[in-house]
Amino acid sequence: LIFEMDKNQIKHSFNLIYNLINKKTYKIDLLPDQNFIFDKKLCPEFKSIRRYNNYKIDNFELNFPLAFIILVYNDVEQFERLLRSIYRSHNIYCIHIDRKSSIDVFNAIKSIVDC
């Protein structure tokens, strides 16, 4: 909504930043890992809501695919935001989930990757 210049969302964002700076607490609570565990039939909705298909690719990018390796231990939302920012369908992604991660982290990452 910020990119669409929604005035209410912009004002809300400024208030969040202002409060974070004034309270000297720079921690924003992330969504619980369980929120990212979903059935594969919901993939189209997930990709649409999280805007995974909103990018333009030129021929140079198509002819020069990249490979990424991402190590995840916790904070699935942080991983998902990173993935969304770098994701292009023609690239290759290797996601390593740390053995000490919780089962919720594993299942959430699996849901995202399977999608």
Image: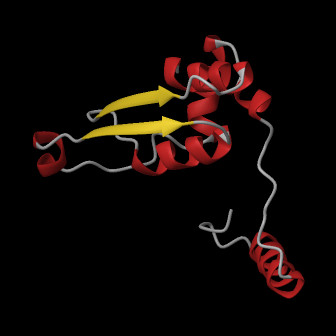
Name the residue rendered at 77%, 78% in the picture.
Answer: 17
65 on left or right of 89: left
Q: Quadrant of residue 16?
A: bottom right
Q: Residue 64, relative to residue 26: is it above or below?
A: above
Q: Residue 32, relative to residue 102: is it above or below?
A: below
* Residue 7 location (% of width, % of height): 76, 76
* Residue 4 location (% of width, % of height): 62, 66
Which of these two is toward me, 11 or 103?
A: 103
Q: Residue 69, relative to residue 86: is it above or below?
A: above
Q: Residue 99, relative to residue 68: is it above or below?
A: above
* Residue 34 location (% of width, % of height): 78, 27
How is the protein colored in the picture?
A: secondary structure
Which of these two is toward me, 106 or 3?
A: 106
* Residue 8 location (% of width, % of height): 82, 73
Name the residue rendered at 54%, 36% in the picture.
Answer: 72
Inspect this view and state whether residue 72 appears: yes
65 on left or right of 27: left
Name the residue rendered at 74%, 75% in the picture.
Answer: 10
Name the residue rendered at 52%, 21% in the picture.
Answer: 115
Name the quadrant of the N terminus.
bottom right
Taking the view exactly as shown, the residue that stands out farthest to the front is: 100
Q: Quadrant of residue 44?
A: top right
Which of these two is toward me, 86 or 68?
A: 68
69 on left or right of 110: left
Q: Tell how many labels.
A: 0
99 on left or right of 60: right
Inspect this view and state whether residue 43 appears: no
